[in-house]
Image (cartoon, rainbow, N blue to C red):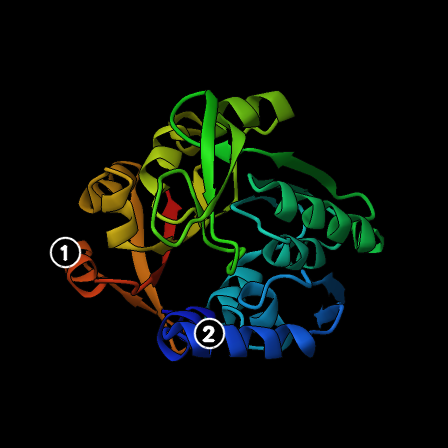
Amino acid sequence: MNASEFLYTVVCRPAPIRWVVNRLILAFLPSSVRIGRADVLLNPHDPVVSGALAMGVYEKEEISPFSRTIQPGMTVVDVGANLGAYSIVAMDRLHGQGQLLAIEPSRENFALLEKNLKHNQALLQKTKVHAVRGALSNKAGLAVLHKNPANKGDNRLYPDALLAETEKVKIMTLDNLCRQKGIRSIDVLKIDVQGLEAEVLMGSRKILQASRRCHLFFEFWAEGIIKAKSNPYEIFVMLKNFSFSFFEARQGLLVPCKPLELIKRSVGRRYINIYGVRND
């Protein structure tokens, strides 16, 4: 569980405390924060993701290896980009070379993602950037996005008691999207989709097969995957078939991990950040 989730689901679990803490965070939330050379615009209505960014605790263990992996000239894909923190880190690291594909389904988050990309366009130089509003899945069509009004990072394609708002969203496969954008292989793939990882990967078979040296960063949440009616273990089987090796990010180090042990440990709202690497 990352710092923002701990704050929101443990410390602030009682409704009265959550209400007070959320109001305090929003009252003192700055308009933007610096990440490397970039200036990230925050969502004034989001105490969780934007709040964690403002406090300097947003996914620090995850962003560090993600940033170190990216080199100029790479192709980076950010699935579930939210307001664009990872995308902007990628822009910074690409040094005006390579390309970035950022995908986000929420209308509110996507608007801020586009603003952040434009706000930091000085970092782009010759970097080719694609921002797409939609949700990735194993098929194309339309779906209902269930949204958490108090946590802009907790939007899902399945219902839950926390998700009080909805909007219609276009769904697509990463294979088709990469084909449309002229992307032939991926060097770095980050996925944060609240339990829909299996569907995203099933719709990415062709591009993963073509990506001989791919670095994969994803948030593993067994309960969310089960709620999405998928099998957590099948995600690792699928990736193993593409010759991925798996590691867990612990205190800045990458530790080899075993899928069955991860599934047992990721109970309730516990997330485990996984790094996978393919090097055929």
Few, some or many residues within 10 Å of mark 2 (<14, 14–19, 20+): some
Task: Determine whether, in the image, residue 26 is placed left or right of residue 220.
Answer: right
Q: Nearer the viewer, residue 141 or 190?
A: 141
- Which residue is depicted at the point 64% across and 61% down? 45
Task: Determine whether, in the image, residue 212 is placed left or right of residue 89.
Answer: left
Q: Nearer the viewer, residue 140 or 46?
A: 46
Q: Which residue is mark 1?
A: 260
Q: Position of residue 186 (x, y in %)?
A: 52, 39
- Which residue is depicted at the point 53% across and 78% down? 20
Q: Secondary structure at mark 2?
A: helix
- Which residue is depicted at the point 75% across and 49% down? 117
Name the quarter where the N terminus is drawn: bottom left
In the picture, the disc for residue 100 is none
Q: Nearer the viewer, residue 26 or 180?
A: 26
Q: Position of residue 153 (x, y in %)?
A: 50, 55
- Which residue is depicted at the point 31% across and 61% down? 247
Task: Determine whether, in the image, residue 45 is placed left or right of residue 200.
Answer: right
Q: Which residue is mark 2?
A: 18
Few, some or many residues within 10 Å of mark 1 (<14, 14–19, 20+): few
Whether residues under marks 2 and 1 lie with C-beta atoms below 8 angstroms apart, the answer is no
In this rendering, the answer to whether 279 lies above or below 150 is: above
Name the quarter where the C terminus is drawn: top left
- Is residue 31 in sight in this rendering? yes
